[in-house]
Image: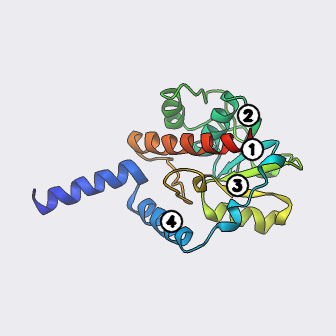
Amino acid sequence: MSRTGFFARLNGWISDHYGSRSGFVRARWHRLRYLLGGYQAYRRVDWDSVERLVFVCTGNICRSAYAEALAKSLGVESASCGLNTKVGLPADESAIQAAMLKAVDLKAHRTTPIQGLVPRKNDLFVVMEPWQAEQLQGEYGKAYRCTLLGLWGLPVSPHIQDPYGMSDAYFDSCFNYIEKSVHEILSKVR
C-alpha cells in the first residue's frame, strides 16, 4: 500500500469513528485525562435518587435529542436541552435519518434551551462533553448533579464528538456509542 493510500484509509477511519481529526484528538485527550484520574467527580452518582435523566449537548438537535428519545422509548423519564440553542427547532435531518435506522423517532423533537428547562430536585444532567459539564456547574453551581455520558460507555470516552455536519458513518458510530452508554446508565437507574 502506498503512503498516500495509507493516509487516505486512516483519514476515512478517523472520519467514520470520530467525525474529524479534531474529534479524534479531543477524544484521545479527554480519555488520557480520564486515565490520569480526571472526571472522577462525574462518576460519583447516587443512582437511587435519580428520578429523571436530562441529556444535554450544544444544540439539542442530535446527541441529546437521540439519547432522550432512546431513554423514553425504554420507559425511563427523561428530557433534553441545549446549552446554545433556540426554542422549538427540529432535530437535524441527518440525526432523524440515523435514529430512524435504529427504530428511534426524532421527527417530533423540538429543541429546548437549558434556560427553558424546569429542573427538578432529583434530575441527573448527562452531558456529552467535559466543557458542557463545566459550563453547567459554572453557571448553576452544584444545584445540577451532572455526569458525562461517555464515562458509562465501553470503552470510556468522556468526549462524544458532535456529529452535526459529519458523515452518515459517523452519525451511526456516534449513535451506537450513545445507545450503549444510555443502556448502561439505565441499568443503574432502574
Image x and y of residue 118, in percent: 86, 46
- Is the residue 102 above or below the residue 128 in the image? above
Q: What amino acid type should be assigned to the residue bearing mark 3? A: Leu
Kind of element beneath mark 3: loop
Q: Earlier in the sequence, mark 3 or mark 4?
A: 4
Q: Mark 3 sits on what residue?
A: 83
Q: Are marks 3 and 2 in contact (CB under 8 Å)?
A: no
Q: Mark 1 sits on what residue?
A: 53
Q: Quadrant of the C terminus?
A: top right
Image x and y of residue 151, in percent: 60, 56
Determine the CA span between mark 3 and mark 2: 23 Å
Determine the CA span between mark 3 and mark 1: 16 Å
Image x and y of residue 172, in percent: 44, 39
Q: Are marks 1 and 2 in contact (CB under 8 Å)?
A: yes
Q: Mark 4 sits on what residue?
A: 31
Query: What is the crowding at mark 2: few (fewer than 14 residues within 10 Å), some, or many (at least 20)?
Result: some
Q: Earlier in the sequence, mark 2 or mark 4?
A: 4
